[in-house]
């Protein structure tokens, strides 16, 4: 399967470390280095200007560290991230921050190749809009990271979704998944005929709704087929009235 070139940015305060990354990338012609940065401040400017697909990111740098850099980026515009560091104790935090992999220095080529294989699989998923969306452009499938694997979820299987900061909790088939995307951004991609926002932080699949119980002050409670109970706030009652045919 052919894919577009992956545009990578190298962020490390050590010149030799960036050189080592370039040497390791020589075995991966589908990855093009579009820039190098020696600190996080430079990286923020480069990311805005170059919009790289992938960042190789050191953690300990003068001034802002790699984690703080990621917090400065908008979650809906976050590139793929592979941390490269001499310190192994930050691995769990790195994956919590949404990194695809975590490579220790000095770089081992075999381990690096393994990380790039993971990046490539993720990239191929992002580059398959024909199979991920409907003809009208609505999202048909989601790729969600579960441990070291990628779980593909058909949107029609989703029961409901709750906002969780820069993440969303996706509930489908009795399981739930944490996905790095804001609720508002995800809602833009979903079919409005199927997915309804019922609260500032909740989206529900209308096909899963079993009952609606009116409450006081214009609010209501929605009961799903599996018994899950969700609040329908007064703010979103008008939209629900149109979609669900409420009185």
Image (cartoon, rainbow, N blue to C red):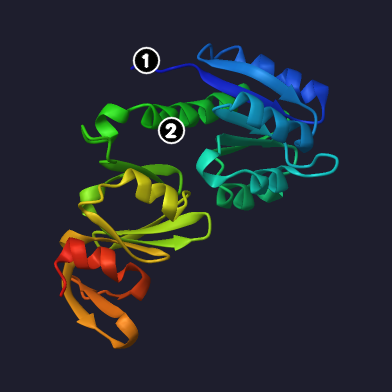
Which quadrant: the C terminus? bottom left
| Horizontal arrangement in the rendering, residue 163 relative to residue 23 (left or right) | left
Q: Which residue is mark 2?
A: 122
As helix, strand or loop, the secondary structure at mark 2 comes to helix
Mark 1, residues whose alpha carbon is within 10 Å: few (<14), some, or many (≥20)? few
Q: Which callout, 2 or 1, points at the residue further toward the start of the chain?
A: 1
Q: Quadrant of residue 24?
A: top right
- In the image, what residue occupies the spot 23% across and 35% down? 136
Front-most of residues 19 and 139 = 139
Measuring 54% from the left and 24% from the top, which residue is drawn there? Answer: 113
The x, y position of residue 44, in whole percent, is 70, 35
The foreground one among 137 and 95 is 137
Q: Residue at x 14, y 67 (%)?
A: 245
- The local crowd at label 2, few if under 14, some if 14 to 19, many if 20 or more residues have their Cα within 10 Å, is some
Task: Residue 128: give x, y in percent of width and height.
Answer: 33, 28
**Above or below, 129 relative to 93:** above
Q: Quadrant of residue 49?
A: top right
- Relative placement, left or right, of 216 versus 148 is left
Query: Residue 219, image x and y in percent?
Result: 31, 80
The image position of residue 87, as x and y in percent, is 74, 43
Label 1 sits on residue:
2
In this rendering, the answer to whether 202 lies above or below 150 is: below
Most extreme residue toward the right, as rendered?
A: 62
Q: From the viewer's perspective, is 61 left or right of 190?
A: right
Mark 2–mark 1 distance (CA, rounded to whole Å): 14 Å
């Amino acid at each position: 399967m052919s894919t577009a070139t992956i545009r990578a940015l190298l962020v490390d305060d050590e010149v030799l470390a960036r050189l080592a990354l370039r040497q390791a990338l020589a075995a991966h012609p589908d990855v093009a280095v579009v820039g190098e940065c020696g600190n996080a401040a430079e990286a923020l400017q480069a990311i805005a200007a170059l919009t790289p697909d992938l960042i190789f990111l050191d953690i300990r740098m003068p001034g802002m560290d790699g984690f703080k850099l990621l917090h400065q980026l908008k979650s809906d515009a976050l590139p793929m991230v592979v941390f490269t560091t001499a310190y192994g104790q930050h691995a769990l935090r790195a994956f919590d921050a949404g990194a695809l992999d975590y490579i220790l220095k000095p770089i081992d080529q075999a381990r690096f190749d393994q990380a790039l294989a993971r990046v490539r699989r993720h990239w191929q998923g992002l580059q398959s809009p024909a199979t991920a969306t409907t003809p009208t452009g609505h999202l048909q499938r989601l790729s969600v990271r579960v441990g070291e694997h990628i779980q593909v979820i058909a949107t029609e299987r989703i029961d409901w979704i709750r906002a969780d900061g820069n993440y969303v909790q996706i509930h489908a088939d009795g399981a739930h998944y944490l996905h790095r995307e804001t609720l508002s951004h995800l809602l833009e991609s979903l079919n409005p005929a199927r997915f309804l926002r019922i609260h500032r932080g909740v989206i529900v699949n209308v096909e899963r709704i079993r009952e609606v119980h009116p409450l006081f002050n214009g609010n209501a409670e929605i009961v799903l087929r599996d018994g899950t109970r969700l609040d329908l706030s007064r703010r979103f009652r008008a939209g629900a009235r149109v979609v669900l045919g409420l009185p």
